Image (cartoon, helix red, strand yellow):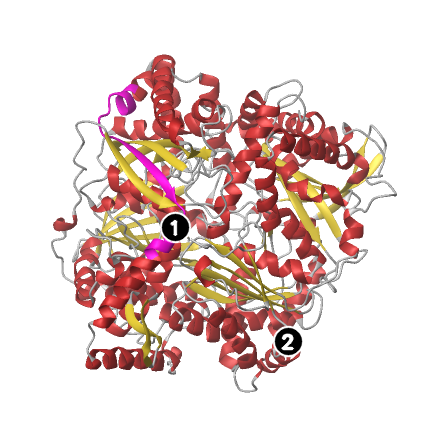
Amino acid sequence: MYRAAVVVKAAATRSSASFSSSSSSTRKTTLEACVTRRQMMMSSATGMIVMKSLSGNSGAKATASTIANAPTTWEGKKGLESLRRLKAGDLLANGAFRVEKVEPVDDYQVVSVALKHLKTGAHWLHIGADDSNNAFNVGFKTVPMDDTGVAHILEHTTLCGSKNYPVRDPFFNMLRRSLSTFMNAMTSADFTCYPFATMNRVDYDNLLGVYLDAVFFPKLEEQDFRQEGHRFEFAKTEDASSGLKYKGVVFNEMKGAMGSQNARFMRALGANLFPTSTFHYNSGGDPTAIPDLTYEQLKAFHALHYHPSNARFYTYGDFPLEETLMNAETMALNQFEAIDVSKLDISDEKRYTSPIVAEVSVPRDSVVNDPTKTAITSTAWLMLNIVKDDEKATLDNFALSIASDLLLSGPQSYFHEALLEPGYGSGLAPGSGYGNSRRETAFSVGVKGVGEDDIPIVEQKIQETLEKVAKSGFPRNRVDSTLHQIELDAAAVKPNFGLMVGIGTMSTWVHDGDALRPLRTLSLARKLKQTLDSDPHYWQNLISKYFLNNQHKVIVRARSDEKYDAKLEEAENKLLKELESKLSDDEKKKIVDDGIKLKAAQDGEQNADLLPTLVVAEAVDRSIKKWGSKEETLRLSSNNIELKLQVDEQPTNGVVYVGAMFDCSRLPDRLTPYLDYFADYVDQIGTSKVGYKEFAEKIKGVSGGVSIDILTNNDKNTPLKWTENGEVAMNIGSHCLARNADAMGDIILDVCTDAKWFGDDERLKFLIKRRSAQLGASVAQNGMGYGKAVCASKMSAAGELENRTGGLPQVALAQRLAKAEQAGVEEVKAACSEIQSLLLTPENVKRCRVASQAQDVEAGKAQLAKWLSALPSTGSKQSSHDESSLKANLAAFTPQSSSKTYVAIKGQTNYCTGAIETVGYEHPDAPALFLLSQAMSTEFLHREIREKGGAYGGGSSFVPSAGIFYFSSYRDPNTIETIETFQKACEWAAQPDSITKTMVEEAHLRAFKSIDAPIAPASRGQSLYAQRMTDSQRQNFRTRLLDCTSADMTRVAREYLSNKPMTVCIVGSEDKVPVDDASYECVDAEGLPFKVSTA
């Protein structure tokens, strides 16, 4: 997996820029937890992992046991004490390792032990914690000096078989032979790492052996290099006259990864900030350069970089340290001698002596509201080295992340006021924020969607804003609000804490920097407070030093090109034709022969029994985990209404979570398209008493924000047909430290009763234009999500509703409203104010919830009662008798079976989706379909779509709550061919001998690793609240799943999938639109009829 060079920014509100794009229209549904589309966790200001409050006032004291879904154990305490007793110089694992340093980190109730492998010099960091979700990571400093993607392709090829496990794909095989809570590999700008996590000790040892063998003793066969990296192949493998093509998993992955405006711009920004070092290059690989990489170069890169002397090993959790050290020693490390890896050291970037300006071209977004405003300008500075042991630089790094938050996050931020409010652009430029994931940090800020005439104005405004801050500094109350977000994030218990620390440490540790940097956040927050108390000019000096007096300054100006991707495709095809014209008959024959050999290897049997595995009967409990949710009533004193209340007493570490669900079903259906506008805007427009900037700061100072989600639940027996049991609801909630419960209640009350829809049209106009730009840019990068939404909209009422509120119809609506200017503002505020008056009444509350520690439950109840009692009681009528309600529209839905849709986007890769109607969650066949989707993904679709087809990913999934069986591919070079593969998968599964007992066993493991994945305490019981999923229903599904056989899976394949109508949606490149196929409805990224370009 390629990780674009990560730029970690300050704690952000929804309006801040982010390096990772996500669609507001996508919601995640699992069997055990429900995560809806607008739930957002405020990240820490440095991207470091935080678990504990800054002071004792919250009543929270984080311990690792709160992360592990279990109370603190005597064994866990004993294990931590044994680590505390270690001292520098102690030898472990029969003298193979020497303890270098022992450092208890009391902020997190963990003990860190730094060790060195004496024979090779390998570094090892162990974080002992009373946490059963144990993690491992091994990382290597990787320093490519070109754009061929050698580090990324090596990451892929390394996992294609090794000395002790010479099977074709041990990594993907282990995904179905393990109960890992996480398994992956990732390539960053300057390191490659291989992390996993699991709660099972046998599983841990199994994965440790496979991972160590993979990285240190890979086969690295040329055939695997050709499959994963790049190769020549003819369009039809055996037909040398069908046209020469480039193929390869990474080649196609990077076409997708670099296929957006954001990705191309950020790459240009990084390349110009780092003109001479490894950071200048695309470590994932640029598709135009990937074919230049040779097999010999790949092997040489591995020999130098993948050696224990260049390795960093990380372990976390409650498993005994010495046992793991012994295993690593015997499995790998004792077979190596130390080598000199100093040639891999990276020097600080050579600094510019004066600012530079770079002009670049980038792709145009698939949907653009104003074609005269498509440029981007951004100003960036290279700042400080965070690897050196420099206490002042360490504090400055933390402070710069806080400054980034104050400069960029929320409508009250400095650059929001200077750049976005005046309308210079549609949003912040890609990459805006402070990045401290490299050895030298950087900051960038700019605007996208800007007109040519405004480019110099924007650049001047950036300079003026920084001069203003350098003169006056930041108000202390706003700094404190950002630090409060760190405190709140510190208290929020996270099930993947150890894993995230293990990944976060690599960026500095591989350069011999502080390995514990991810755990320094709280101490640095205290240090910053002390510094601000003693130095009133700290901020002024910081801004002057790193911004105004910093000559390593880069201005990148980008013009978007509507034909950008088409030109790349044209150039690639021209090059291939030239190369093909020079091929001799013998060379063509070799390409054909190589392709046939690769296909034969992909089709060949592999002895996966060489790999270790868990046994379902031993590793999987037949009983569900019960969260002990309590059903109570909440009486509203103002109108004597009793509401259903769910109470979840959980170890939430002093954080209180509340929510209330409002019935939307009787709203006039004409308001349905605006539900997501209401959810997005209601807490961003201020109140009659407080402007939107002050209100944003108020929210930030006492809570984790207001989350508002649209939830759809239908009858679990017949989810495809809307029934009286169906519900559409809006959940409004928040979370806070217990001491702030009253203040949080006041915030929610203001949001629900006093949102200022009228009186500030400019604010609404800005929000509408921003939404238009965000949705327009989202289609190409979230093609799979949009494709599934299109399919579901043709099959069920619930799917049609979700598509209306979060799919392509929302993209089209956003563009129309933005173009309508004031008329669009009037339309939105009229609809949203009506939704508020009709929906937010106590009579419409379906149920509510409090999740907290036992001692904080009453505080949660009190503030729930407080704001719900204050809602205006206007009766329960939501729609008049003469207009259709949302509920009536759902009931009238008519499915369009086996429809085909092609959504044309700008890009070089495609997203293919197929969907078939099946049965609901409570149907006896649902577990067999769920299990079948696991087996079909690993046993058929992975081979056909990824290995043979070259897509980055593909598989099948069954969503019991929707009654739909999905097929999908991701960053796929193919379109119609992949849809045919989906249909072949159904026929394969229906054959009597296709599914073996081994496949069933492995499918069970793959299924339960997601079903039984660790859940944050605040989310325990959420499936009952959000999805009405009872313990009895969950247990029935689990029992049936465990009892499922290969015969059951074959039977459901025949009954529900084989030769059944498939609804299809392809979100793909414009040059592959099947305009001559009358069976396809061809539309553009707004869902409007596709128009063939005549240019």
Does the magenta segment cover residue 503?
A: no
Identify the residue under disc 1. 563
* Frontmost residue, 333 versus 1013: 1013
Evaluate whether residue 494 shows in this view: no
Q: Amino acid at mark 1?
A: Lys
In whole angstroms, how far apart are the C-alphas of marks 1 and 2?
A: 39 Å
Identify the residue under disc 2. 1060
Secondary structure of the residue carrying tag 1 is: loop
Alpha-carbon neighbours of circle 1 within 10 Å: few (<14), some, or many (≥20)?
some
Does the magenta segment cover residue 560?
A: yes
- Counting from the top left corner in percent of width and height, residue 917 is at 66, 68
Mark sitting on residue 1084 = none
Return the disc, 1 or 2, that comes first in the chain's sequence. 1
- Counting from the top left corner in percent of width and height, residue 188 is at 31, 50
- Point out the frontmost of discs 1 and 2: 1
Q: Amino acid at mark 2?
A: Lys
Evaluate whether residue 844 shows in this view: yes
* 856 sits left or right of 249 in the view: right
Secondary structure of the residue carrying tag 2 is: loop
* 672 sits left or right of 561 in the view: right
Which residues, given as a range, are shown in magenta?
Answer: 544-568
Alpha-carbon neighbours of circle 2 within 10 Å: few (<14), some, or many (≥20)?
some
* Frontmost residue, 579 versus 421: 579
Q: Residue furthest front?
A: 1094
Q: Residue furthest right?
A: 881
* Location of residue 257 with respect to 1054 vertically, above or below: above
- Counting from the top left corner in percent of width and height, residue 418 is at 44, 22
Determine the residue positioned at 66% across, 79% down: 1055
Determine the residue positioned at 57% across, 36% down: 819
* Location of residue 280 with respect to 244 vertically, above or below: above
* Frontmost residue, 913 versus 162: 913
